[in-house]
């Protein structure tokens, strides 16, 4: 096993997780717990800052959505105005069409009037030539004086009056028709020009409305992009906050585990002192009774380390195998092997590796996770319900190295070791778990 390789990975893992290696030296115990608490406070403060930013992003998103609603309302207003303008343009176009037809009709009337005027002009010219040729008004006098009788004179006077009246009527009609023609032409041309002008104004208004609508639509797109960006930033911040919350909880577990470990170390030291005192007393008593010196030895219980890649993690009886079993009257799948024994039972690493996590959880209690690289494959072993842990996150371990003591912490019913073996990384669904008996001889 390449110890330098595992040490570099262990350091990286420790930095990534943000936890501190556990110290076995009692002189550094207070410093270790205080460092963890300081780290927890830093994480908590960072989480509060992130949560504050999340609230800011939420406010920005709400403001953005309100602005989008305003823009939508404006666009709907423009649509209504554009629709109304289009209707007015259609009405003006219809009026222009009707007025144009009226103009065409008027052209026919104008043509007829022009023909009448032309005929009257010719008649008046003829009348003027006749008067000129016959001496003008003197000829009317000759007509009157040439009467044969008074009755003839009266008839002649009536005839002259009729001719003069007819001429006057023709001239009056000529003047009236000319005035009528000019007036009608002026009215129709003015009306057509006004309609064309109104239509042009409406077309300009429609262009302006479409332009403003396009600007609002572009602004709406920008707001949508901004909202998507803000949502992404919020999600990232929420993810970061969640990670910090997990880290904060993990550090809290590490603090509890460290405190429990230190308490167990203190208890072990007291037990060791007691054993040493008992051994010394036994040795003294043996020496006194035999009258000579006698050798006596007191050994700490240990787990035999087998040859090969793997070894049994603890001594004791197998109480629960890997697979389906019944717990409290309910069927369940047991993802590990349980080993039980009384007294102070050491737990050892099942193979060379390094500790990726050492903490306390409500289910596993004091638990250690060790990763192993064996023949190019990754394995993960889990040691749960320990009374205490002797190794911290990022610590490289050898096969058979003591990592803690059997206990009854977490969701446990009596002192035992719950041991899991995963062909790959550990996950909450335990999809990589395998029967430890495939690799270890129990």
Image (spheres, rainbow, N blue to C red):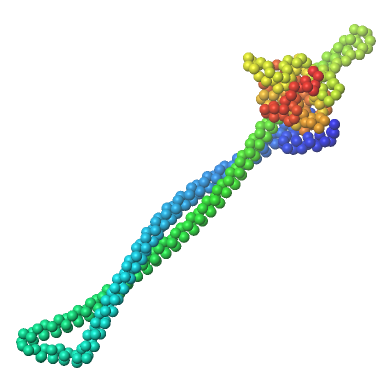
Q: Nearer the viewer, residue 196 or 169?
A: 169
Foreground: 389 or 246? 246
**x and y, in percent, of residue 434 in the image:** 74, 24
Using the rendered image of the protein, determine whether residue 28 is visible from the camera's viewpoint: no
**Which residue is situated farthest in the top direction here?**
289
Residue 6, given in percent of the width and then of the height, sits at: 81, 34
Say which residue appears at 57% left-offset and 49% top-offset: 225
Q: Quadrant of residue 114?
A: bottom left
Image quarter of the N terminus: top right
Q: Position of residue 49 (x, y in %)?
A: 62, 41
Please report the residue visible at 54 percent of the width from the left and 51 percent of the height from the top.
221
Give the residue drawn at x 83%, y 25%.
Answer: 309
Residue 155 in view of the camera: yes
Above or below — where is 148 with respect to 96?
below
Quarter of the picture holding the C terminus:
top right
Q: What residue lies at 68% left-to-right and 34% top-to-bottom? A: 247
Residue 299, quarter of picture:
top right
315 or 26: nearer the eye? 315
The residue nearer to you, when weighing 130 against 216, is 130
Is residue 184 found left or right of 349 in the rendered image?
left
Q: Quadrant of residue 440?
A: top right
281 to 42, vertically: above or below: above
Residue that extends furthest to the right in the rendered view of this protein: 292
Count all numbered tags in the image, as a single digit. 0
Image spot of residue 196 (x, y percent): 39, 66
Residue lying at the far front of the rendered structure: 148
């Amino acid at each position: 096993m390449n110890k330098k390789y595992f040490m570099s990975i262990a350091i990286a893992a420790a930095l990534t997780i943000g936890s501190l290696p556990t110290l076995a030296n009692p002189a550094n115990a207070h410093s270790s717990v205080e460092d963890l608490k300081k780290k927890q406070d830093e994480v908590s403060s960072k989480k509060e800052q992130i949560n504050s930013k999340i609230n800011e992003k939420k406010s920005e998103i709400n403001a953005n959505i309100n602005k989008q609603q305003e823009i939508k309302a404006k666009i709907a207003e423009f649509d209504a105005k554009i629709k109304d303008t289009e209707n007015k343009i259609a009405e003006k176009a219809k009026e222009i069409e009707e007025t144009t037809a009226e103009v065409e009709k008027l052209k026919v009337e104008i043509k007829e009037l022009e023909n009448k005027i032309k005929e009257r002009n010719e008649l008046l010219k003829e009348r003027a030539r006749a008067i000129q040729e016959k001496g003008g008004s003197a000829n009317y006098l000759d007509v009157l004086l040439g009467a044969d009788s008074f009755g003839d004179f009266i008839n002649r006077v009536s005839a002259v009056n009729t001719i003069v009246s007819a001429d006057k009527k023709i001239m009056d009609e000529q003047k009236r028709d000319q005035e009528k023609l000019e007036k009608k032409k002026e009215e129709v041309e003015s009306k057509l020009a006004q309609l064309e002008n109104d239509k042009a104004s409406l077309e300009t208004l429609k262009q302006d409305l479409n332009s403003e609508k396009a600007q609002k639509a572009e602004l709406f797109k920008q707001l949508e992009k901004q909202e998507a960006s803000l949502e992404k930033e919020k999600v990232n911040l929420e993810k970061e906050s969640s990670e910090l919350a997990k880290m904060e909880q993990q550090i809290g577990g590490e603090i509890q585990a460290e405190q429990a470990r230190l308490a167990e170390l203190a208890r072990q030291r007291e037990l060791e002192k007691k054993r040493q005192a008992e051994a010394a007393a036994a040795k003294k008593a043996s020496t006194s009774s035999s009258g000579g010196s006698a050798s006596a030895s007191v050994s700490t219980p240990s787990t035999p380390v087998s040859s090969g890649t793997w070894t049994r993690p603890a001594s004791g009886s197998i109480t629960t195998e890997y697979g389906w079993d019944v717990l409290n009257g309910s069927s369940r799948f047991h993802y590990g092997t349980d080993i039980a024994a009384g007294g102070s039972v050491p737990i050892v690493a099942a193979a060379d590796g390094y500790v990726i996590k050492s903490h306390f959880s409500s289910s596993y209690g004091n638990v250690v996770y060790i990763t192993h690289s064996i023949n190019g494959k990754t394995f993960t072993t889990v040691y749960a319900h320990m009374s205490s842990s002797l190794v911290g996150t990022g610590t490289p371990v050898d096969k058979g190295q003591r990592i803690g003591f059997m206990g009854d912490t977490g969701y446990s019913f009596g002192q035992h070791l719950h041991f899991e073996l995963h062909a790959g990384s550990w996950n909450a669904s335990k999809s990589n778990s395998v029967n430890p008996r495939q690799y270890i001889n129990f």
